[in-house]
Image: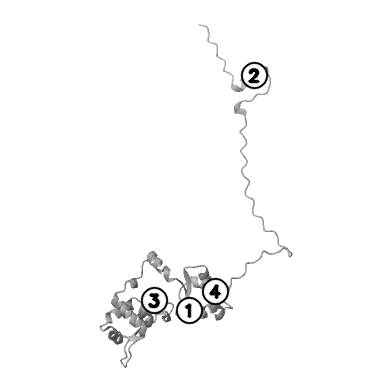
Amino acid sequence: MPDEQPQPEPPTPRELGQAAASHLGGDWQLDADVPPAAAEPAEPPPASPQPPPHRGANTPRPPEAPPPAPEQIVEAMLFVGGHPLTPAVACATVRGLTAEAFRDAVDALNRRYRAQNRPYLVQPRDGGYVLAVLPAYRGLRERLFGGPREARLSPQAVDVLSVVAYRQPVGKAEVDAVRGTDSGSVLRQLVRLGLITVQHRAEAEGREVRYGTTPRFLQLFGLGSLDELPRLGDTEQA
């Protein structure tokens, strides 16, 4: 057998390309030789905030908001809530506010609330003023938060409470005489509910304990003060 001739090695793709270029002319380039596409330029970093322009001496300043009026300040203090707001406390809190200006602000607020048919008014209570809903809307508050326990007072408790309200400070003996029965347990119940309180305790001379109503009593019945209790003559005619 004749000796097997060694097989030539196949040309590389580069060599094929070079040969084709020499015969066919023109430019050539293999995929392998294509340089990688340039990466997209990254987004430039956000520009640093520029300092505000220098305000020259002749640059006009923006107009400043006017200070709140006394009426607005008093309204804000009433919205804060807490203890009834007295003229003394308001004047000590706000510089330059006088007791007369405070009462004028309260009157102005109530006039505005009435004109706008608001469901609340500024009402006097315990020597000060509170922002309270009108009686027509108190039922809505009870639906939202549940009626107070005192709203379901027994007829006996209402009897005792009425005697205390109209004759305070009044002792147990007088309440018993008006009702014709012992009222000790009912008086203790009303004290626990916070509707009445002891206004005068017995001393060495044996004076009787006397009872009076509380601010909670006024709140429950929607009264600004005891002066707003119906007159007995009016209730008899009703």
Marks 3 and 2, the one that precedes in the sequence: 2
| Residue 238: percent from left, percent from top | 36, 77
Residue 20 tag number:
2
Residue 108 tag number:
4
Residue 128 tag number:
1
Residue under label 3, please give it: 216
Marks 4 and 2, the one that precedes in the sequence: 2
Callout 2 crowding tier (Cα within 10 Å): few <14, some 14–19, many ≥20: some
Which residue is rendered at x = 28% and y = 77% of the image?
Answer: 156
Cβ atoms at labels 3 and 2 below 8 Å apart:
no
SS under mark 2: helix
Q: CA distance from mark 3 to mark 4?
A: 27 Å
Query: With 4 as the anchor, is 211 left or right in this view?
Result: left
Callout 3 crowding tier (Cα within 10 Å): few <14, some 14–19, many ≥20: some
Q: CA distance from mark 2 to mark 1?
A: 107 Å
Residue type (three-letter) at the residue carrying disc 4: Ala
Residue type (three-letter) at the residue carrying disc 2: Ala
| Residue 146: percent from left, percent from top | 36, 66
Residue type (three-letter) at the residue carrying disc 3: Arg
